[in-house]
Amino acid sequence: MKRFLLAAAFFVVLLLIWDVAFRTKIWSPVLLPSPWQVATYLKGAAVDGTLAKATVITMRRLLAGYFIGLVVGLPLGLLTARWKLFRDTIGTMALGLQTLPSVCWVPLALLWFGQTEAAMLFVVVMGTLWSVVIATETGVRNVPPIYRRAALTMGSKRLHMWFKVILPAALPFIVSGMKQGWAFAWRSLMAAEIFVTILTGFGLGQLLHYGRELSAMDQVIAIMLVIVVIGLLADKIFFSPIEKFLHRRWGTSQA
Amino acid sequence: MRQAARHHSSVTEELEVIAPSKLAIEGVSKSFRSASGTVLALDRVSLNVAEGEFVCLVGASGCGKTTLLNIIAGLEKPDSGTVLADGKPVTGPGRERLVMFQEPALFPWLDVFGNVLFGLKLKPNLTKKDRRDVATYYLELVGLSRFEHANIHELSGGMKQRVSLARALAPNPRMLLMDEPFAALDALTREQLYGDIQEIWKARRKTIVFVTHNVREAACLGDRVLVFSPHPGRIKEEFAVKLPRPRDINSVDLAAHATRITKALKSFGQAEAAVTG
């Protein structure tokens, strides 16, 4: 309770500073709207459904791209961990492409796919894929050999070994890779939505983009807040329980 | 009809005391390449283990005793020589010969019960209920019924090795291979486990090959104690320990045996030092 109150106080103070900054009128209200203006925009957008619609569209794109990234990335990671040939080729490529900021994929995607859904999907997949590949590979290669040996003596081999021993043993790494992949997917999608200005299916990124076009600072800040909150919620709802389970089972310290 | 009857009684059959395995090792050699050249870990080692016998291999670290155990387990292949388990050549690991490792090789993603079930799930012709019954039986045997659903990291070192033992026993192997399983435990826990392992050995009638560098431990557990000399790994001497069981590690008779074995071990150490020095 005390922790909660302290955290709440922190955010209230933050809002107060913002409000004071607005009242001093050092910056033009066009550039710095008041918290109330942002709240008013949020309320309006919530009531007329703009926000919900944009959020649903964004989440759909995100989940589709993330899911493809996982489905392709996990097996690729296993292959790179298992065979030197894949490590030298796909592994090296993954390592290189992972360092490429995902927004760098946008120009290529725009030229290949035009202003389309496919362009956004492509950018999200590219953002997710490589970190999943690398995390899976690292995880598998860090599985203590003793687990394999113990399982071998009990008659485990091939697929059983992969699914019942190696993958579960690599789970902590894989989950942190999935989490990183999620963060990258989220960033990539925002980059894609801001640059891919399609006319139907506005996501949060597009709302942000058109907020800028209209110089509607209240909209820009409001949407940024929404994006932050969604990121936080995803972490709390999806990843936190998995991580808690891992900490409990493995006995690693609760971060 | 027979098939059905068999299936019906599979739990009791699973828990039945089966004939222990015998082992014949003939001229096994194994070398490893290392930075400083080729090391002969085992040099023409021959060894017979009778059905239901408890044999201890003692020697300094690096004398090849663990390598021999791995070869018996089928986890490593010898460069030459043969290993026959019940007359059949060992070509790979199998659940007839289960291993208990020095470091607990328990799976942290499973709880205690899940770990004991692991090997059972790989055994064909067992129903879910059979497997659970068998796992429950062995957890009780090692005295850990209350910890069925504990996570591995919550267990003490001794409890972990008890779970390892239950996991190795559960698929009802004919032979148990133990690689310094108690080396990392404190003395008190170890003494308890000496008692337990002797009891279980008697009750479940397994052939046990037990690797250790602790002479007293070897004298306490083994029907026979084989002393290894290092570089190259060879069986140098053999001691029969004919003390009544269960044996107490602190008994005077046992100490006399241990002293003789230690003397033998030391003599190779000096011979070794004389050669290299």
Image (tube, coloured by chain):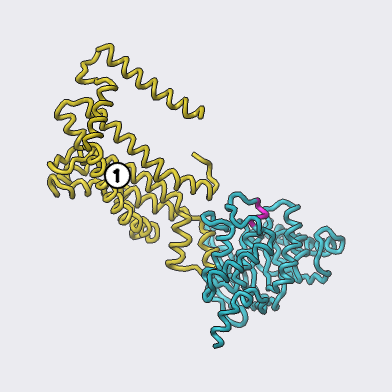
Chain colours: A yellow, B cyan
Amino acid residing under circle 1: Ala
Depth check, front residue: A35 or B211: A35
**For the point 55% across and 47% down, which residue is it?**
A251
Q: Residues within 10 Å of mark 1 (few under 14, many from 20)?
A: many
Q: Is the magenta stretch mostly helix, strand or loop?
A: helix
Seen from this angle, which residue lies furthest front?
A47
Residue at the right extreme of this rendering: B252
**SS class, disc 1:** helix
Q: Place residue B21 in its image quadrant.
A: bottom right
Give the side of residue B192 with respect to residue A98, left or right.
right
- Residue B243 vs B185, above or below: the answer is below
What residue is pinned by disc 1?
Answer: A185
- The image shows residue A73 at horizontal and vertical percentages of 32, 54
- Locate residue A44 relative to residue B256 in the image: left or right: left
Which span is picked out in magenta? B156-160
Q: How many marks?
A: 1
Whether residue A61 is in magenta: the answer is no
**Visible residue check, residue B66:** no
Q: Mark 1 lies on which chain?
A: A
Residue depicted at x 43% and y 52%? A139
